[in-house]
Amino acid sequence: MTPTATTTATIPTFDDAVARYEPVIGLETHVELGTASKMFCGCSTAFGAEPNTQVCPTCLGLPGSLPVVNEAAVRFAVMIGLALNCSISPWCRFARKNYFYPDMPKNFQISQYDEPLCENGWLDVEADGKIHRVGITRVHMEEDTGKSLHVGGATGRIHGATHSLVDYNRAGIPLVEIVTEPDIRSPEVARAYVDELRELCRALTVSDVRMEQGSLRCDANVSLRPRTAPGEPAALYGTRSETKNLNSLRSVERAIRHEIVRQATRLDAGLKVVQETRHFDEASGTTSAGRSKEEATDYRYFPEPDLTPLALTHEYVDAVRATIPELPAQRRARLAADHGFTPADIVNMRNAGVLDLVEETVAAGATAEAARKWWLNELARRAADAGVPPIGLTIGPFDVARITEMIADGELTDALARTVITGVLAGEGTPDEVVAGRGLKIVSDDGALAEAIDKVIAAQPAIADKVRGGKLNAVGPLVGAVMKAMKGQADPGTVRKLLLERLGQ
């Protein structure tokens, strides 16, 4: 029996593994481009259609069919390259990457090999309170494969399945593959890189980058080398594994952490790390062996004979450059400078899907803090309860700005504002129409407030005596009782002030 690492060495903790071995991580990220048609034919790229209904002789590789390059896909790829600080090649060409697999109907993939579209860039990402620069080796174009569905097994993989089905709708969808240098040294930085890349592509509007639908997928190359003392030359890179098709930020981090521990366990036991592809299991958080990793020679790359090379002029690249919008890092810096948002504020708003809405609400007249507060808390919760993104709510930035204005003017309390939001969401009109229709404005009649205060003091003499005796914190229940009597249509601060005055404090 071949010895395994788990039978000959204790499995180290992650912290112990990285204390003794330095992780060397490079990522290959595939981004499906958001074009209306496929890379080399006119078939639709819409997600979710019935299997094998968006295919034609070209994307099925039938004899006599010829590919034609999608210009929109080229433009999107150039945008990504420029945003990643890459050099755009004035001349590049496509190649055939040959391998047999059922989800490749042509038995080759049209990709780029030694002459990619974009090279030698970088992306700065923030993790652990530091900025990490990740080098970009290349950004090249290719077509996506079909999708295999393995049926009858417990894991959804081919091993143990009774049969397999193939959907070729995805075959031929434009992809860019973004390959990093082996610059990443921790799972946290790897996750931050994929997150930043996703936000960058979203800002460029070149892809919806929905990892759960496969429009952004990540392969993680991981190896370990012994740590060296300061001043000593770094050890040579170790043998790498490639964990394929990670489809969430959490999976990227978990898979890399597992690989670091797995490889450290083997090295501790005196075993070699095998160069291979691996699959990540979400349920167990572990990886399993796939196939031995091919080298470039195994794919028999050669120039695609049915496509002429791409020769992009400086004028074309400059025209594309002029269309690039504000990128995520620039936006964060501007939001911090203009509105005082902290990095944590921006992350929270982005994760909640309200960052654009907050900006639009500020533009509509709200303060930055008020816009952040209402969208990030109350309205994000309402959206989650309704099962829609915040932008899908039937209340917009102008409505929210008007509500915050009424709060600032003393016309609404926060509690009344929530009632106004309920009315707007229910289709009762604008905030002003809801306030008028429901009679929600704060009661400013001192006589009505004085009457309610006198009744509450008379009803709770014991608490009133405590306040008269100097226990000011005891006034809270009295404030609550007055607010209840006024049906929330009073300012709590004013109520507290009047109560204390009436009780001699």
Image (cartoon, rainbow, N blue to C red):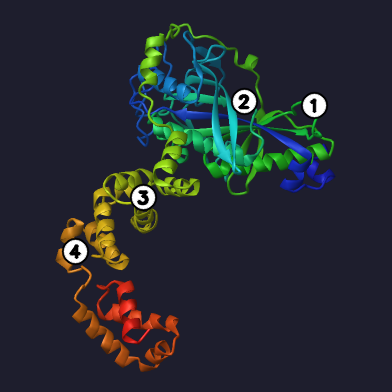
Where's residue 493, x and y in %?
33, 72
State which mark lies toward you, 4 or 2. 4
Residue appearing at x 80%, y 37% in the figure: 267
Say what amino acid the circle numbered 3 marks: Ala
| Residue denoted by label 1 | 233
Between label 1 and label 2, give the one nearer the viewer: 1
Q: Residues within 10 Å of mark 2 (few under 14, many from 20)?
A: some
Above or below — where is 357 with respect to 198?
below
Q: Across the whole image, how many numbered discs are drawn on residues?
A: 4
Q: Toward which corner of the image does residue 126 lie, by quadrant? A: top right
- Report how far apart the C-alphas of labels 1 and 3 lie in the structure: 50 Å
Give the class, few, some or many, for how many residues have Cα within 10 Å of label 3's Cα (few <14, many ≥20).
some
Kindly identify the amino acid type of the residue bearing the numbered disc 4. Val
Mark toward the start of the polypeptide (4 vs 2): 2
Name which residue type carries label 1: Pro
Crowdedness near tag 1: few (<14), some (14–19) or many (≥20) residues, C-alpha within 10 Å: few
